[in-house]
Image (cartoon, coloured by chain):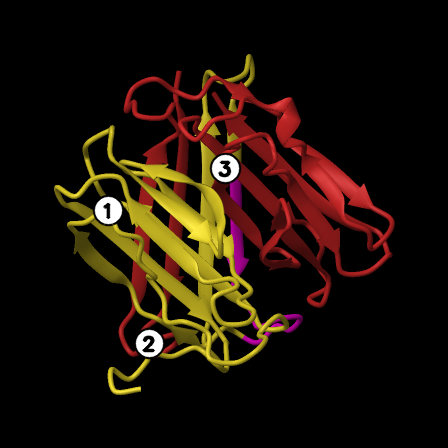
Chain colours: A red, B yellow
Amino acid sequence: MAITAGITLTSAAGDLVTDALVLSTSTNLTKAGSSTSALTQTSGLARKTTESASQYILFDADDYPSGPAKAGKIYLKNTETTAGLFFTISIDTKTIGRIYAGDFAFLPWSNIDGTNDIKITPSTSASHTLEYMLFYE
Amino acid sequence: MATTTASLTLTSTDLFDDSLSLSNTSTLHKAGTTIGLDQTTGLTKTYVTATQQFDPFPMVKGTTNANENGRVYIANLSEDETEYIIVTIGDLVIGRLYAGDFMWMPWSPKARHVNDIEITPSVATGMWVEFMAIHNFANIYPDSADS
């Protein structure tokens, strides 16, 4: 079994910096400490449409295996197209950052002791849609 | 205007009965606009030889940057499957990047030390780590050694 994640960052010469930026890397999503044993479980690719500016729990840490040596990867995407609409991403009580319209994030998740809930807070109470997926062992 | 794009792919032919083939491209904009992010720390590649936690990016000087926008790329370039780095924001552990893993996430620094991103290598025998922030923060720049 194999799950591959790849990222490419590009910017033409003279845009972000004077030289061109072309960064590309990929990795197989594997269990902690193994280069060959793939992550086998997933939440599935899901969508959530929010209708209030309240904070929502996307992944309740109590529902997933805990421990620092458990590998997890989270994918998030703000599917909105209006530039000003964003989701604030938090883990437990800590704000990580905002993903604006069209933005995505891909980050590891250490559900150390069952407290690291993944949470989102929409920027407004209008309808906002987020796409998300968790891979874990 | 600076135009920087990020593309992410997630693929698998055997995780599900059906195949997974997810692809996204995003242009990096300043908060709430279609104006490109125009600052970067530059792509840094460093060889770390201690298990001491370190800050890969300059610390925030102001009191709040919550309305500004930033993206962070971090990769563990180690080829030893047992070696990892722990990525932390403030006092919260986000997760571990094992050999070859990368992450791409938003970053909204707030007051100094509150949302600093930190990296802790798992071994002191030497690991290559790569990182870059692309942002429009007004109050993030390196400290003078004299200050």
Q: Position of residue A73 (x, y in %)?
A: 49, 35
Q: Secondary structure at mark 1?
A: loop
Q: Secondary structure at mark 3?
A: loop
Position of B33 with respect to B43 (left or right) is right
Q: Position of residue B68 (x, y in %)?
A: 58, 73
Residue neighbourhood size for the residue with mark 3, other residues' Cα within 10 Å, grouped as few (<14), some (14–19), many (≥20) = many
Mark seen at residue B51: 1
**Quick one: A119 or A86, which is closer to the camera?**
A119
Residue range corresponding to the magenta coloring: B23-35
Judge whether residue B34 is colored magenta: yes
Instruction: State whether residue A120 is above or below residue B140.
Output: above
The span from disc 2 to disc 3 (Cα, nearest Å) is: 32 Å
Q: Residue at x 44, y 66 (%)?
A: B4
Q: Which residue is mark 2?
A: A17
Label 1 or label 2, whichever lies nearer to me, is: 1
Looking at the rendered structure, the kind of residue marked 1 is: Thr
Judge whether residue A126 is colored magenta: no
Q: Quadrant of the C terminus of chain B?
A: bottom left
Position of B86 with respect to B47 (left or right) is right
- Marks counted in the figure total 3
Looking at the rendered structure, the kind of residue marked 3 is: Trp
Are labels 3 and 1 on one chain?
no
The span from disc 3 to disc 1 (Cα, nearest Å) is: 20 Å
Q: Residue at x 76, y 60 (%)?
A: A123
Q: Which residue is mark 3?
A: A109
Are labels 1 and 2 on one chain?
no
